[in-house]
């Protein structure tokens, strides 16, 4: 039985503790993602109100993500995550109570979702920065692959669990489950004991909030592979993902038997993502960012796959392949950041990463519909591919991307970290 447990979980008890709590929390997030629109509709809200509540959660994330990065580099990251979990536990629990008692209104849901989004903004940079403090540098890739596996599995299981809960207990019952997952996650975080952190190195950058934010940007700007990777990811989120979230369902309505056909495509992508995380766990490569850039080029072809005109089965299989590529890219990308960016600046760097990906995606979502109406569905999908795939291939042409080693290098050079990636006592 012991051999069935991944070695990184057996050998790294602190990571195992973190992984257990976060895996359940991620599943709860997927359940809430499905349940919240039905919660809005159940209190008499319209389709516009569903968008309003979704935006109420997104806007605070955009406003506070950079602040979350600065705080996570100033203070113990697991404590910030604990505070975030407790706030989200209270918020989701309150929403569940309001729904189950019939008191909730759209305004209640919008305000509480805004508070939830604010807590989320502080959690994400702290989470990325915490991993090197609970797992050895030689096992970062395996740890990130397991985290990705939990997220991919939740992508497959979450909608099914949410559908059953909404049917049995209503949206309030589903959101109550999500609240409980935050309580469980908080319980694991309370017991977490990360390794020593780089407070001496942080002291050298200590200053005002804006000064620390600028120092974080210097860490991004001084590493060509980091800012070029962020630029390629911004293109992926702005250009490719709207094909999945906006144009794909519209095309499915006309060509693939509507929601049933589209759910097949989404499920195939989820299965591919699981396979990709399993591959990334085993993958050994001396040049991880070169492999990541190649994987991003495959992932960027999703618009072409969706607009290919092929059968539903063919599209589902190809989407599964892109799912593998997406998982491999993100595992290698996060591992590269955790390996080569100094620990005391890691959360600030990751906050810029989150801002560029999550922050710019609404622009693409808003433009996808009008552009497809003006150009036509398939020409728009082909144009998305013509922009996104070359952007990913351009990333592969960057020398510091192709040559970035799997392990941290000695100081010196354009892209070498100024300090060790993980500072320990």
Image (cartoon, grey):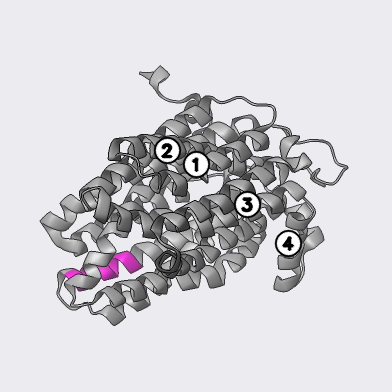
Report the side of 126 relative to 312 (left or right): right
Image marks 1 and 2: residues in contact by CB distance under 8 Å: yes
Residue 198 percent coordinates (x, y)? 72, 50
Name the secondary structure under disc 4: helix
For the point 20% across and 63% down, which residue is it? 171
> Badge 1: few (under 14), some or many (20 or more) residues near its Cα, within 10 Å?
many
The Cα atoms of the two marked residues, 1 and 2, are separated by 7 Å
- The C terminus: image quadrant: top right
Is disc 3 placed on a helix, strand or loop? helix
The residue at the point 20 percent across, 71 percent down is: 41
Work out whether residue 197 can be spotted. Answer: yes
Which residue is disc 3 drawn over?
Answer: 232
Ranked by sequence position, the earlier of labels 4 and 2 is: 4
Indicate yes or no whether the magenta region holds residue 97: yes
Determine the CA span between mark 4 and mark 1.
26 Å
The residue under label 2 is: 273
Q: Nearer the viewer, mark 2 or mark 3?
A: 3
Nearer to me, 166 or 269: 269
Circle number at residue 326: 1
Q: What is the x, y in percent for residue 164?
A: 16, 50
Residue 77, image x and y in percent?
57, 54
Alpha carbon separation for disc pair 3 and 4: 17 Å
Q: Quadrant of residue 86?
A: bottom left
């Amino acid at each position: 039985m012991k051999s069935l447990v991944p070695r990184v979980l057996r050998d790294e008890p602190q990571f195992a503790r973190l992984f257990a709590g976060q895996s359940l929390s991620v599943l709860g997030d997927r359940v809430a993602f499905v349940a919240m629109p039905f919660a809005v509709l159940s209190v008499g809200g319209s389709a516009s109100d569903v968008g309003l509540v979704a935006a109420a959660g997104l806007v605070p994330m955009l406003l506070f993500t950079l602040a979350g990065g600065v705080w996570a580099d100033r203070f113990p990251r697991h404590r910030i995550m604990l505070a975030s979990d407790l706030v989200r536990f209270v918020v989701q629990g309150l929403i569940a109570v309001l729904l189950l008692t019939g008191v909730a209104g759209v305004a209640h849901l919008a305000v509480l979702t805004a508070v939830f989004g604010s807590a989320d903004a502080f959690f994400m940079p702290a989470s990325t920065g915490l991993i090197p403090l609970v797992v050895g540098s030689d096992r970062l890739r395996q740890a990130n692959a397991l985290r990705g596996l939990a997220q991919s599995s939740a992508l497959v299981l979450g909608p099914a669990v949410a559908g059953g809960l909404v049917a049995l207990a209503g949206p309030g019952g589903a959101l109550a489950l999500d609240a409980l997952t935050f309580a469980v996650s908080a319980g694991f975080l309370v017991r977490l004991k990360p390794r020593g952190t780089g407070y001496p190195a942080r002291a050298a950058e200590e200053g005002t909030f804006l000064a620390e934010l600028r120092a974080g940007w210097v860490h991004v700007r001084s590493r060509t592979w980091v800012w070029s990777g962020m630029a390629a990811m911004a293109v992926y989120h702005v250009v490719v993902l709207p094909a999945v979230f906006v144009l794909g369902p519209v095309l499915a309505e006309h060509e693939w038997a509507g929601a049933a056909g589209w759910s097949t495509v989404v499920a195939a992508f989820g299965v591919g993502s699981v396979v990709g995380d399993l591959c990334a766990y085993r993958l050994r490569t001396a040049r991880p960012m070169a492999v990541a850039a190649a994987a991003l080029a495959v992932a960027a072809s999703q618009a072409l796959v969706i607009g290919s005109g092929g059968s539903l089965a063919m599209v589902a299989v190809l989407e599964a392949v892109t799912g593998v590529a997406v998982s491999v890219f993100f595992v290698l990308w996060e591992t590269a950041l955790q390996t080569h960016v100094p620990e005391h600046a890691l959360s600030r760097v990751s906050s810029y990463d989150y801002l560029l990906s999550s922050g710019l995606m609404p622009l693409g979502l808003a433009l996808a519909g009008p552009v497809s109406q003006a150009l036509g569905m398939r020409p728009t999908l082909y144009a998305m591919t013509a922009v996104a795939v070359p952007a990913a291939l351009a990333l592969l042409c960057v020398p510091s991307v192709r040559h970035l080693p799997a392990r941290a290098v000695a100081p010196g050079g354009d892209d070498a970290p100024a300090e060790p990636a993980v500072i320990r006592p």
